[in-house]
Amino acid sequence: MWSGTTDAEIVREYGHRLIDRITEYLEGIAELPLSPSPEQMHEVADHLAGPLPRKGRDADEVWAEFWEVIARRSIHLRNPLYMGHQVAPPLPHAALAELVIGLFNQSVAVWEMSPTGTPVERVVIGWMLELLGYPEGADGTFVSGGSAANLTGLLAARAHLFPELWEKGVGATPGADRAVIFAAEHSHYSMERAVGILGLGSDAIYPVPMVGGKMDPGSLQRAIEEARAGGHVPLAIVATAGSTPTGRIDDLEAIAEIAEGEGIWLHVDGAHGASLLVSDELRERVRGIERADSVSWDPHKMMFMPISLGAIFVRDQRHLDNAFRQSAPYLFHGDAEEIRSPDIGQRTLQCSRRLDALKLWISIEHYGLEYFAELLERTVENAKLLYEKLDAAPDFEALHQPETNILCFRHLPEALIGADPELIDTYQRELRAAYNAHGRGWITTTRLDGRQVLRVTLMNPGTRPEHLDELLIGLRRVGTEIEEGVLELAPAPR
């Protein structure tokens, strides 16, 4: 329904209203339930269900419905008691940059469609390469997230080992059908997805045992020897810097020594932990990452950017070029005399590419790297402090010392001491579900060594020691409410 109102007038009127509503939301976030109850989730789905709108509605009505029905019942990441998944409360200027990114709608895959956006991305990639400690001739590109970054890293490894495979395929490339990847149990699920997409099959992941929750270098060496003896061709070693379950960081130096000695591509999944590089205090924890052939890194995790903003880096830019070989003269117009094309789309999965680099460029230019380091260090310190609180509490069990901002633990009230392990697992699941449903806080759960455990990721720099105390108090309170019902499921052994 055309009203004759100009775009500028619409943005002025509704932009001001939107900023006012966002401000009200931020000021009152502590009064909102942290997350919707299961009943509210169903209410939202039922409310939104309906026929495809054939005619539009008044904008005020639609926006009001969003704030009342959808926004109020969202998970509120800025609440300091949100300690769930690896999703950050974004920095204010990064969130504001999202509006500009959407309005300008630059497609960064092709230089002529984003002649100013392309230099922005190249500058930010250069900054991150500097933090990685990569040499001259290295390169990187932004992608949607860690899954796309890990896939791209393995594509680069495949192109390096089998340069003819892109044209000829797995069946016509000697050794490609026997390629294997060495990864530990804690590697991200995207690794299995990547080898499936590569056509190697999930069986191509050669499991490497862990010691202390980390890939064991000695077992890695033996796995490589065993794989070669069995006729397999090593494609890549995948190490992890900041595993999703526990945040642990593999011994990157030791693994890099093995990779270099065996002549095998080393990919480091640093989607979570690579951000430690911004802190002089913490970067030592990922020492050796600079020796990897490729590294994934998600600024939308511990650099507090809005989703989505992931990145992949390679030590040699040629490997990124070779990962994708396609001719598209209707899009890519590189000069034959140039060393490499300015069209970023030739080095990435995506053709439709937002100028997501802008939010990181604006944020780094405004806040400065030291500010990022301060926020990051605060989240890691919170994990350390929570570990100490858990360790001192008789009814809680911390399951590992945190290396980043992720920590797993269990609540073990007196009535569960000596109980059947399956009953204890059930209690952890019930406790997490009931705690989240109350809207007092939000945590996750996972399995470690076959047992169900509680898990927190302390992504909010606004979380303070009193909020950590409130977490434990809240879990105890909810545990008391559900304990009797859970214990009836299977009585403790006598």
Image (cartoon, helix red, strand yellow):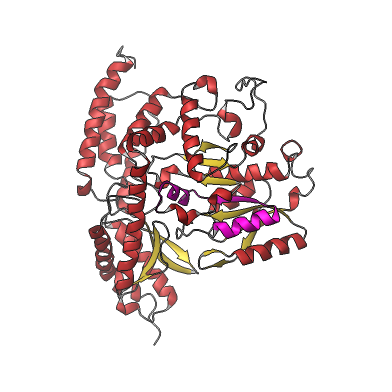
Query: Residue at position x 20%, y 37% from top?
Result: 24
Where does residue 334 sit, x and y in percent of width and height?
62, 21
On the rendered structure, is 25 left or right of 292?
left
- Relative to residue 136, is residue 389 depicted above or below? below
Q: Quadrant of the N terminus?
A: top left
Where does residue 30 sit, x and y in percent of width and height?
21, 48
Query: Residue at position x 25%, y 59% from top?
Result: 465
User: Quarter-wise, where is residue 363 in the image?
Assistant: top left
- Relative to residue 219, is residue 93 depicted above or below? above
Where does residue 138 sit, x and y in percent of width and height?
58, 38
Q: Is residue 458 visible?
A: no
On the rendered structure, is 2 left or right of 311?
left
Q: Residue furthest bottom?
A: 494
Q: Is residue 308 visible?
A: yes
Please say whether residue 448 is one of the residues in the magenta stretch.
no
Where does residue 440 sit, x and y in percent of width and height?
25, 56
Instruction: Provide the residue span drawn in magenta.
Output: 252-281
On the rendered structure, is 275 left or right of 210?
left
On the rendered structure, is 69 left or right of 312?
left
Query: Residue at position x 55%, y 41% from top?
Result: 313
Residue nearest the viewer, comparing 221 with 436: 221
- Relative to residue 159, is residue 34 depicted above or below? below
User: Quarter-wise, where is residue 152 in the image?
Assistant: top right
Q: Quadrant of the C terminus?
A: bottom left
Please say whether residue 263 is one of the residues in the magenta stretch.
yes
- Relative to residue 293, is residue 104 depicted above or below? above
